[in-house]
Image (spheres, grey):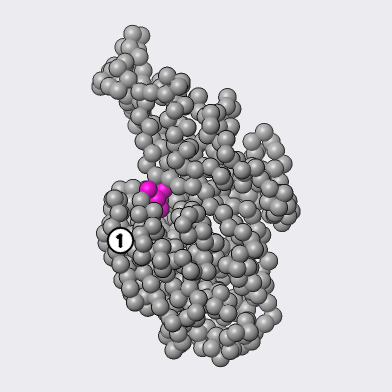
Amino acid sequence: MNRRDFLWGAAATATALSTPRFGYAASADLQAIYQEIEKRHDESVQRLQTWIRQPSIAAENRGMQEGCQLTMQMLHEAGFQSVNKIPTDGQPGIFATLDAGAPRTLGVYFMYDVKQVNPAEWSSPPWDAALVDKPGVGKVVVGRGAVNQKGPQATFLAALHAIQGAGRKLPINLVLVAEGEEEIASPHFTQVVHRPEVIAALKNSQGMLLTDASQDLDGVIIMQLGAKGVIEVELVSSGERWGRGPAADLHSSEKARVDSPAWRLVHALNTLVSADGNTPAIPGFADKARPISPAEKKMIEVAAKRMDEATAKKAMGVQHWINDVSWEKSLEMLMSRPTVNIEGLVGGYTGPGGKTILPHRAVAKLDLRLVPDMTAKEAFAALKFHLFKQGYGDIEVNMTGGYDPNSTSIDSALIQKQLSVYKNSGIDPIVLPRSAGSWPGFVFTGDPLRLPAGGFGLGHGDGAHAPNEYFLIESALPKVQGIDGGVRSYVDFLYALAG
């Protein structure tokens, strides 16, 4: 038995791999697939490295056509018979189908874009996809997109290669939709999903799979039954549009007699939140926010007892929650509160030393997180109307992307099958009402499809949106899976959902 098989066994129950996990699949079938996973380990790693080495940054329009083509090629190679590029008003989407002749169908969501990088902040170049030993964790691949989202997606594709490489047909048909604008808040994804042929292919599916590397370093899995919505907004204050202040940067001595667009932006921002900056103060913004339910409160109560507050604070580098609330209350706030956040604030000179100018222009980038039953359209309208009513109608308000929240019932067959695979692997997941982050699952859970949607997948990675993002390849932790264990989990899930 090699190291990867040992690590899988350590994280699973005492059930041996030769024993069928599910009654519908013979042990020989799964055993042959598991052996194929092991055989194809290097191939799976190389596929992920190839994907990472292709930059695809929607925010910079960098490498997007190449990233789309590479993703389409990988889908073809994984057995999808039909792979089509879908044009949008922004970056193209992808619509792919794999007809296995099975009675059931699963929808799958992919993204091929990644966040921006500053190479100077990385220990190895972000596009090298270097394999390195991470002390206490194991062998990892480091690169932008490693865990968000190319690692989990490459792991899912490896499961398809392993099933077919073992001479088996997939137990379930697949319908996959992908976008290249997730990291800029998916401004055109509905143009992909709402095409008639995509709706027709998805409408009878069991639900939508969001691939994930869901394990923390202690092996714990947190399942989230949805996600907050979001709008990303840029506010621009300029002397030209205001009609006051300078049309170009001035010497700062002129502040004695000339208005400042930068101060105007600061005062406008102050009207959006309470004095402490923590509570949205935009009239109408959160009027439709759904209060947290008793069932959701119970989930949070259970989760708070199983999760460690000190570990969470250390990971985030914080010492206090807002108003010094309790750990359980902080989780409830995380699940249930809409937010108004300043992502960035730029105006004038920000380089070394001083430069005594009066800036003619200042920009704030915001994100506003939304809970059920809020909508992105109504949130944006409330923001624009509020600024106008406050006398800041001259400030440009540009929505660069956004979408509604999404929710899925824990009783749905999709979520119950995910739970069964985890528990069959010796893991009892923590279940929370939703993620405080966002993904555009509303296009699947809302009209016209109304499908369940949920993230799934064993494995680990970290550093999404940050320097030194990584995905675990070979685990040094007994309870945490490397890439082969993640591939196994997708094989088990596909067979579970088909059974």
Instruction: Please identify the quarter of the rendering in which residue 323 is found.
Output: top right
> Seen in the image, is 101 located left or right of residue 16?
left
- In the rendered image, residue 418, in percent from the top left (x then y), is placed at 59, 68
- Please name the residue shown 44% across and 63% down the image: 109
| Quadrant for the C terminus in the image | bottom right
- Please name the residue shown 72% across and 41% down the image: 326
Instruction: Please identify the quarter of the rendering in which residue 198 is found.
Output: bottom left
Residue ranking furthest to the bottom: 28
Q: Is residue 182 magenta?
A: yes
> Seen in the image, is 156 located left or right of residue 50?
right
Count the labels in the image. 1
Residue ranking furthest to the top: 257
Please, what is the three-letter code of the amino acid marked with disc 1? Ile
- In the rendered image, residue 83, in percent from the top left (x then y), is placed at 32, 70
Look at the picture and state if 131 lies above or below 88: below
| Quadrant for the N terminus in the image | bottom right
Residue 207 in view of the camera: yes
Residues in magenta?
A: 181-187
Residue under pointer 1: 86
Look at the picture and state if 226 lies above or below 265: below
Q: Is residue 351 magenta?
A: no
